[in-house]
Structures are given as structure tokens and as C-alpha cells.
Image (tube, helix red, strand yellow):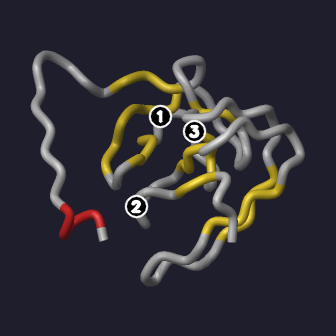
């Protein structure tokens, strides 16, 4: 299993690089509950702390991180592509407050 990236929640369609990763790197993310292990080949260099797609995300579909939508894809995003402000639009509006529920995160 890879310790170079992490899938935070089983519903996530992105993973987060824990260190700088180069295009062509294969990242294997461990299984979570009923979600199987997944191996992704990166299509671009990914900066530490940045997201990459672990499932195909179509334009207009929600980008799920932490088990919640954090934005909407502004273009089709292939598996292994960098996911950031250039291809997602935030769904946040106004003033919001967040809480972390450990039970829901599992």
C-alpha cells in the first residue's frame, strides 16, 4: 500500500498527495470498508497537499473530498489528473461552519 497519498473517506473521488509526486507514478490506495483497493497512474506531476482524481469526474459532477462535495468539475477530469482551482468551482457560498464527525468519517 502507498503511504505517498491518502483517500480520506470511502466516498471520495480524489486522493491527496502526501509528498510531491511525478507524472507516471503508480499510487495504490488501500481498501476502505466496501470500497476496493484502487491503483492510479498519475497523468501529471502532483504537488504535496494537492488532489488527484481516483475516479473519472465528468463536467458538472461534484468533486467529493472528506465524503462531501467541495466543488463542481468545470471540465471532464480523467483518473490521475490534478484536481485544483483550474478544473473545479467551489460550491461554497456565504458563511458556513464545519464540524468533524468521526463516526461519519469511517
Residue holding disc 2 = 9
Near mark 2 (Cα within 10 A), the count class, few <14, some 14-19 or many ≥20, is: some
Q: Earlier in the sequence, mark 3 or mark 2?
A: 2
Q: Residue 20 at x, y = what percent?
A: 72, 35
Q: Earlier in the sequence, mark 1 or mark 3?
A: 3
Residue holding disc 3 = 51
Q: Earlier in the sequence, mark 1 or mark 2?
A: 2
Q: Residue 16 at x, y = what percent?
A: 56, 45
Q: Nearer the viewer, residue 58 or 26?
A: 26
Q: Residue 70 got which mark?
A: none
Q: Residue 64 at x, y = what percent?
A: 41, 47
Q: Secondary structure at mark 3?
A: strand
Cα separation between marks 1 and 3: 18 Å
Residue holding disc 1 = 60
Q: Going 43% across and 57% down the picture, which residue do you hit?
A: 8
Q: Going 34% across and 43% down the picture, which residue do you hit?
A: 69
Q: Are marks 1 and 3 in contact (CB under 8 Å)?
A: no
Amino acid at each position: 500500500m502507498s503511504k505517498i497519498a491518502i483517500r480520506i473517506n470511502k466516498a471520495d473521488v480524489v486522493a491527496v498527495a502526501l509528498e510531491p509526486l511525478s507524472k507516471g507514478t503508480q499510487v495504490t490506495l488501500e481498501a476502505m470498508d466496501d470500497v476496493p483497493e484502487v491503483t492510479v497512474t498519475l497523468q501529471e506531476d502532483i504537488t504535496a497537499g494537492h488532489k488527484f482524481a481516483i475516479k473519472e469526474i465528468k463536467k458538472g459532477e461534484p468533486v467529493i473530498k472528506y465524503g462531501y462535495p467541495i466543488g463542481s468539475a468545470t471540465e471532464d477530469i480523467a483518473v490521475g489528473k490534478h484536481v485544483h482551482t483550474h478544473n473545479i468551482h467551489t460550491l461554497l457560498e456565504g458563511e458556513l461552519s464545519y464540524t468533524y464527525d468521526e463516526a461519519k468519517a469511517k
